[in-house]
Amino acid sequence: MVRINLVPFSVNKAWKGQRYKTDLYKRFERYCLFIIPIQKVEKKPLELIINYGFSSKGSDIDNPTKMVIDILSKKLGFNDNLIYKLIVTKSIVKKGAEYFEYSLKELEK
């Protein structure tokens, strides 16, 4: 798993209205694009596992998922329609220790 020590946030904080990224999302995306390690991704069905470390039990597990997928596909150069299996989990951590981690691999047949 690759761990990114940033606070995952909701879609509501990511977009201004329908189509505009917030400044918070732009900063989050810029940092992730810098920090995510390069990985060769084949044009084959993929499995993506994401684990979020939220400091609030009220955090919805699905809110940051589309943003994370979009950022990963942008950084790693794959079309997210290649994701055939998605496993998303959350853990509760202390405030200030939030993160997300992921694993992306070719789907086993």
Image (cartoon, rainbow, N blue to C red):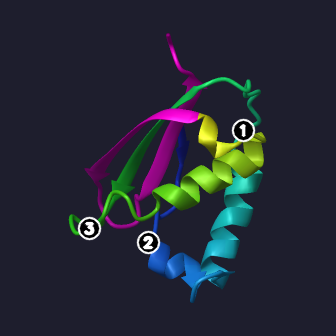
Q: x and y percent of residue 108 in the render? A: 50, 13
88 and 3: which is toward the camera: 88
Q: Are the residues flagged by discs 1 and 2 in contact, CB closer than 8 Å?
A: no
Q: Which residue is most to the bottom?
A: 17
Q: Are marks 1 and 3 in contact (CB under 8 Å)?
A: no
Mark 3 or 2, which is nearer the eye?
Answer: 2
**Above or below — where is 25 with respect to 53?**
below
Q: Earlier in the sequence, mark 1 or mark 3?
A: 1
Q: Is residue 93 magenta?
A: yes
Q: Which residue is mark 2?
A: 10
Which residue: 31% across, 49% down? Answer: 90
Q: Which mark is residue 37?
A: 1
- Considering the numbered disc 2 on the image, is that residue within a helix, a strand or a loop? loop
Q: Main secondary structure of the magenta part?
A: strand
Q: If you read the primary sequence from the N terminus, does the residue marked by circle 1 or circle 2 appear first?
A: 2
> What stretch of residues is rendered in magenta?
83-109
Task: Please determine whether, in this image, residue 66 is positioned above or below residue 58.
Answer: above
- Residue 55 in the image, given as x and y percentages of width and height: 30, 64
Amino acid identity at mark 3: Ser
Q: Does residue 14 show up magenta in the picture?
A: no
Nearest the eye: 3 or 59: 59
Residue at point 52%, 54% (across, down) = 5
Mark 1: amino acid: Pro
The residue lying at 63 percent from left, 44 percent from top is 80
